[in-house]
Amino acid sequence: MKIGVIQASSQAAKNNLLYETVKRYAPCSQVVNLGCKPDEVQRFSYVEISVLVGLLLGSGSVDFVVTGCSSGQGMMLACNSIPGVLCGYAPSPMDAYLFAQINDGNAISIPLGEEYTWTGCENFEQTIAKLFSEPFGQGYPKGEAERKKRDTLRLKELRRSSQVSFAQFLDRLEQPLIETILKKRDVLDYILANGSLETVEWLVKQREPFLSK
């Protein structure tokens, strides 16, 4: 599995903690840190990051994204507004485990603005640990695993039926939002090097006017 780590600028101070913790508990995966980091001048809201999450997943550049914002709720809601993104909210280890096993999504949002007392740090670490403790999508509880898997497939099909295609979504993005996400150079460079041809061509087309300035 290729995992991208990216969170809103409001929690840039937690970026390295998030990245290192994911690496520790997903040792068999390739983990890529895409910010937002404390030294980045440009700031990105959870809405802008959610579009970048969509680009990373929609282009096939990564298989899964660990993200977050202060509450975790806003990022989860924004990510679930992007076609093809099924994002969970994990304030606790059990929430993370159930999302991975039952919902089998491709993104998880962590509340990074919680008070990080000793208990808070332990909860954060155990949340990431439980998320990657077993292969995704096995169903839970085990006695009802097959029914849970069927329900998950139905949910994903409902989402596909109710959303526009990813290509349509990209074509409908407002220009000011596009101009902002184009400033996240590390994410764009990563997608250009690893993403699908369709997304790469869209990004190149969007970047051309800015490169000529």
Image (cartoon, rainbow, N blue to C red):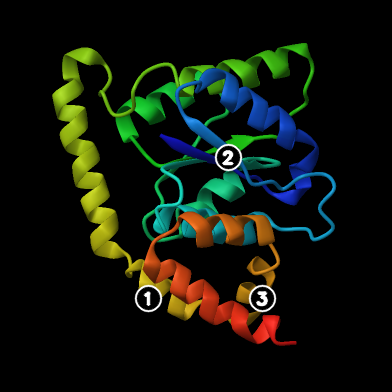
Q: Amino acid at mark 1?
A: Gln
Residue 182, image quadrant:
bottom right
Residue at 53% from the left image edge and 17% from the top image edge: 129
**CA–CA distance in space, label 1 to label 2:** 27 Å
What secondary structure is found at the residue carrying circle 3?
A: helix
Left/right placement of residue 143 relative to residue 107 reads left
Q: Which percent across, then down, holds residue 23?
A: 58, 25
Q: Circle 2 is placed at which residue position?
A: 32
Q: Which of 8/213 is in front?
A: 213
Left/right placement of residue 64 relative to residue 125 reads left
Left/right placement of residue 181 relative to residue 81 reads right
Q: Circle 3 is placed at which residue position?
A: 179
Crowd around label 1: few <14 · some 14–19 · many ≥20 (10 Å): few
Q: Circle 1 is placed at which residue position?
A: 168
What secondary structure is found at the residue carrying circle 1?
A: helix
Please report whichever mark, 1 or 2, sits nearer to the chain's N-terminal start: 2
